[in-house]
Amino acid sequence: MRLSNDLVMINNQYEGVLFIYDRLNHIKYEINDEMFFLISDIHRNELDYDSIIKKYDKGIIEQLIELNVLVSAVDKPIFNIKEVTEMNCARIFVEITDKCNLNCKHCYGGFACNNNTYLSLDTIDELLRQAIELGVYEFDITGGEPLLYKDLEQVLSKLYDAGMLVSIFTNLTLMTEEHLEMFKKYGVKKIITSIDSCYDHIHDEFRGKKGSFDKTLKNLYLIKESGIEIAVNTMIGNHNIKYIDKMVSFLKSLEVPFVLDVITNEGRAVGLNEDMNLSASIIKEIFNKFHNDIDDGANFKHCGIGKRFIYVKSDMNVYICPSLIDEKYCVGSLKGKFQLKKIWKTMQDTFGNLSCSSKCEKCKKCKGGCRARALKLHNNINAIDDVYCTLMKGDLLCIK
């Protein structure tokens, strides 16, 4: 018998998390060490029923079988038991293509319709093979627009067999019924999309294509109905601050989680003349007004930069963050015979202690905010993140 292929079992000792995730029904079950050991032992040794009940409590085994946690070993084996023990190698964030069908005004990456850089299936195969060995269990797909990747179904199939919890960042304007069925078939955990205005014409202008708002909204509801988790990212800036209350009311009416953030002055956004601190103050006011509906910590929690994730560009270079695409923050490449473990170790050795250099006693729950924003604001990656300070305290008390 084995752990069902539809389930992924995670043991991340660095973060103290132990759980089983049902990829088809989108349910998370917390477990303890004893249960992890029991299921791992049965799964890896493919013990038969008689052998199992001689070794373990029959009642517990019968319950696991009834819940389809343990199934007969008839399907092809996959790598759906994850242990993170050497380094906190939890997440890989992959830009599979730099091609995009939109022309967003705030785009940090210069993604465009005429771009044509993408990761090959061979590269993804080798990346996954080594990621499995490290215990990686979160795999985020982004672009550009990932739905433009011609072999997306093959990638999702490989990720399913690799036991990954998959999130896809997409503008949703290109999603078809075939895409939705694909997401359900391969157990995609989460879709993250973007809505920049409650007015269709303003959203469309900001995104650079007429009809974007209607397509995104239509497909958002289809994702929601499917049972797949969906969340919305909304950037606060000059395009929507004049009607921010209406914007938040609209986002709440969608009845899906949403994240508010500021526009960083990089890429195409350099020409927008955004005031990041003003946007942060507005977000703070929103949190104060709707504190029962929005969790400020969830919107700006520390991401684990330099430790728990890597970012792979479509040109195969590996960076510490999607917003730090600079040679200084490149920690390796997937070209040639790369060693993922070595790349990850290089990152942790070099950037594992990134944090805010200001130790403010008045902000006990602050974990340093965003290092990319700090760099953009102060030309120092260890400087304070003014935006996070504003968000957490309502003013800039960390500034000295």
Image (tube, rainbow, N blue to C red):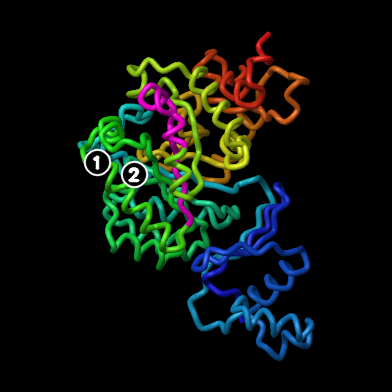
Which amino acid lies under the numbered mark 1 shown in the image of this protein? Answer: Asn
Cα separation between marks 1 and 2: 9 Å
Residue that label 1 marks? 101
Q: Residue at x 26, y 54 (%)?
A: 150
Q: Nearer the viewer, residue 353 or 287?
A: 287
- Give x and y (percent) for residue 306: 59, 34
Q: Residue furthest top?
A: 400
Image quadrant where residue 242 sits: top left
Residue that label 2 marks? 171
Secondary structure of the residue carrying numbered label 1: loop
Callout 1 touching callout 2 (CB < 8 Å): yes
* Above or below 163: residue 145: above
- Give x and y (percent) for residue 289: 58, 32
User: Which one is earlier in the sequence, the residue at label 1 or at label 2?
Assistant: 1
Is residue 274 shown left or right of residue 147?
A: right
Which amino acid lies under the numbered mark 2 shown in the image of this protein? Answer: Asn
Q: Is residue 206 visible?
A: yes
Q: Nearer the viewer, residue 146 or 318?
A: 146
How dense is the environment of label 2, judged by Cα within 10 Å: few (below 14), some, or many (20 and up)? many
Q: Magenta stretch?
A: 229-248
Q: Nearer the viewer, residue 154 or 7?
A: 7
Image quadrant where residue 213 sits: top left
Is residue 264 shown left or right of residue 118?
A: right
- Give x and y (percent) for residue 293: 58, 42
Quadrant in which the C terminus is drawn: top right
How dense is the environment of label 1, judged by Cα within 10 Å: few (below 14), some, or many (20 and up)? many
